[in-house]
Every structure is written in C-alpha cells, then in structure tokens.
Image (tube, rainbow, N blue to C red):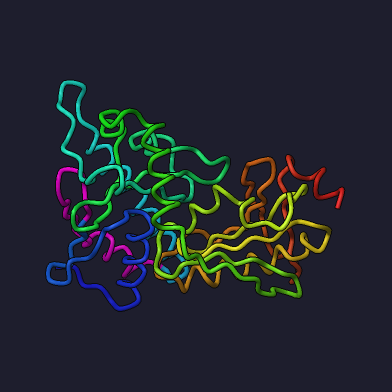
C-alpha cells in the first residue's frame, strides 16, 4: 500500500484532478482510480511515492506533473481500440452530459486519441462525458465518431457547457498593482476555463491590443484589457498572482501569463534578473507591445 504524507497526498490529488478529471485516490488501498470508458483503471502510486521521498522539495511539483502526463498518455493509448475492435461502450449518458474543458496544451500524440479542439497556441479544449453517477471520463475519437464525428461532439459539448456550467458566473473587477483586472469564477466548477473561448463576452470594448489572461485554476480565470504600457508593467504581478493561486488551488490549471491577441493565446515569459523582472514578449507580439 502506498504511504503518502499529507503534503504529498494533496499534491498528487490536485494533479490527478487537473490531468485526469474524476480520478481519485482510494483511501484504503492507496491506488489511483481513474474513470475510463470501459470501467475503472487502478494504478499503484508506489513508484511515484518512492520518487517523491528522495526528490528535492522544489522539484516535487514538476516530478508529479511529468508522472501524470506520462500516465495520461499511456491510458489514452490503452483506451484506443484496434481497427478491428468494436467501439467501447460510452461512459457518457447522452448529449446533455457532454462537457468541454479548456486545459493546458496536451502533447499532440496524446491529444490525437481524444475528441478535442486546439486553442492556439497554449491550450486544448477536451471533450468529457459524464456517466450516470456524474463521474467524468475523456471521450475518445472512436466514441466521438460513433456519435456523429468529433466536430459535432465538440460543438454539442461546448453548448452544454455554456448552458449547464457557465451560468451564474462570479464576474467582478479587482485591483492588482493599481490596475483593474476582471475575475471570472465559479467555485468548485472545473469548466470555468472554457470561458476563455468567449473572451469578448467579458470585455467592455473590442480590445484592439488584446487581453492579458491568467488561468490559475479551472474554476478561476482573470483578464486585463491591454490599453497601454501599464499592461506590460502589470505582467510580473499577474505572474505572481497566477503562481500563488495555482499553488493554493484544489484544481490548479496554469501558473502562466498569456496574451490573447488575434484569437490566439501567446505565453509571456517572466523571469528575474538582478532583482528586477524581465519580460519576454513573443516575436509575434513585439510590434503590438512597442506600439503601446
């Protein structure tokens, strides 16, 4: 049986929820239980726990993320039937139980196994189906094909998410470093990041210079309309906020800062040099940044 310390257990539980929706740790066996279209998969956490016990504390989070990324890849590969096999029985209980969840970009090989839509350049919108107990599982491409094709399933999942999950959002303005930042949240909902597909809905105008975005958790995102050079100066504070909220969240998403421009998300690099923040704006956005 896997022996997990409180901090270790919290780290694993948070990453499981982030990477494998519906996954949980069995308190009796210590195994990770992952919902699949064909039933539940049980995975021992012994190897991960052993690695964490000898790892440096500052590397623990990255180690867990890497382990879960590899696990997700192997599970999705295992879920893909051979060309001769019949499609697995779906876990979903009909179109009304489909959901679309925007997540940090998956590796192309893994994403290709599930129904998804790329959200350039930093995210993927992944289709999830809820079973009779409300437990989520990824919808494979084979299942989507049986439902009418990936694009039809994605559109259905998006519409159902908008109607059933993204109503009653808490939309409010807060101040960060003297600048107004709009928060979009719904406590406990793992689908708030899907609101990033409709950013204009939450703006006061058309934002010709784009919008700064953070998505520290799946139930909490924030945006800031780029109106001048003050937005550039705000980036380090947004990065610090995203990092802090992501670390403290029960469902962390990303600690990055993104610049949404031309319907695309660009990650903004933030580092520190000589005690001062250094901002790395992608080449595609430098002309926009310089024009502010």
Q: Residue at x 35, y 76 (%)?
A: 7
User: What residue do we see at 52% from left, 54% from top?
Assistant: 195
17 lies left or right of 58: left
Q: How many marks?
A: 0
The quarter of the rendered structure image containing the N terminus is bottom left
Magenta segment range?
Answer: 34-55
Residue 66 is situated, as x and y percent measured from the top left of the image, at 39, 53
Where residue 224 appears, as percent x and y from the top left, is 69, 61
| Direction from residue 215 to residue 113 in the image, left or right | left
Compared across the picture, whether 173 is left or right of 191 comes to right
Q: Residue placed farthest to the bottom in the image?
A: 6
State whether residue 13 is above or below residue 136. below
Q: Nearer the viewer, residue 153 or 266?
A: 153
Looking at the image, the residue that sits furthest to the right is: 291
Give coordinates of residue 223: x percent, y percent. Answer: 64, 60
Which quadrant of the figure has residue 84? top left
User: Residue 54 in magenta?
Assistant: yes
Which residue is rendered at x = 44% and y = 59% of the image? 62
Is residue 241 a member of the stretch shown in magenta? no
**Horizontal and vertical percent position of residue 178:** 76, 75
Above or below 239: residue 142: above
Residue 148, quarter of the rendered image: top left
């Amino acid at each position: 049986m896997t022996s997990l310390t409180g901090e270790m257990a919290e780290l694993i539980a948070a990453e499981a929820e982030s990477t494998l929706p519906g996954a949980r740790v069995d308190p009796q066996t210590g195994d990770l239980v992952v919902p699949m279209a064909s039933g539940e998969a049980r995975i021992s956490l012994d190897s991960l726990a052993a690695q964490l016990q000898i790892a440096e504390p500052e590397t623990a989070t990255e180690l867990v993320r890497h382990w879960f990324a590899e696990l997700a890849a192997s599970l999705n590969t295992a879920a893909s039937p051979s060309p001769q096999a019949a499609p697995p029985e779906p876990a979903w209980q009909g179109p009304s139980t489909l959901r679309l969840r925007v997540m940090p970009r998956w590796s192309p090989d893994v994403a290709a196994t599930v129904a998804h839509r790329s959200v350039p350049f930093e995210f993927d919108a992944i289709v999830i189906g809820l079973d009779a107990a409300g437990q989520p599982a990824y919808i494979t491409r084979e299942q989507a094909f049986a439902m009418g094709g990936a694009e039809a399933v994605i559109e259905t999942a998006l519409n159902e998410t908008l109607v059933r999950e993204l109503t009653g959002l808490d939309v409010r303005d807060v101040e960060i470093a003297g600048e107004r930042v709009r928060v979009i949240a719904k406590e406990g909902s793992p689908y708030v990041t899907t609101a990033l597909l409709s950013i204009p809905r939450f703006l006061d105008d058309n934002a010709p210079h784009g919008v700064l975005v953070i998505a520290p958790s799946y139930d909490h995102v924030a945006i800031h309309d780029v109106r001048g050079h003050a937005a550039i100066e705000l980036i380090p504070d947004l990065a610090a906020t995203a990092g802090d909220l992501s670390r403290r969240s029960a469902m962390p998403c990303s600690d990055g800062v993104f610049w949404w421009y031309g319907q695309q998300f660009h990650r903004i690099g933030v580092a520190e040099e000589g005690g001062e923040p250094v901002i790395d704006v992608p080449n595609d956005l430098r002309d926009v940044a310089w024009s502010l």
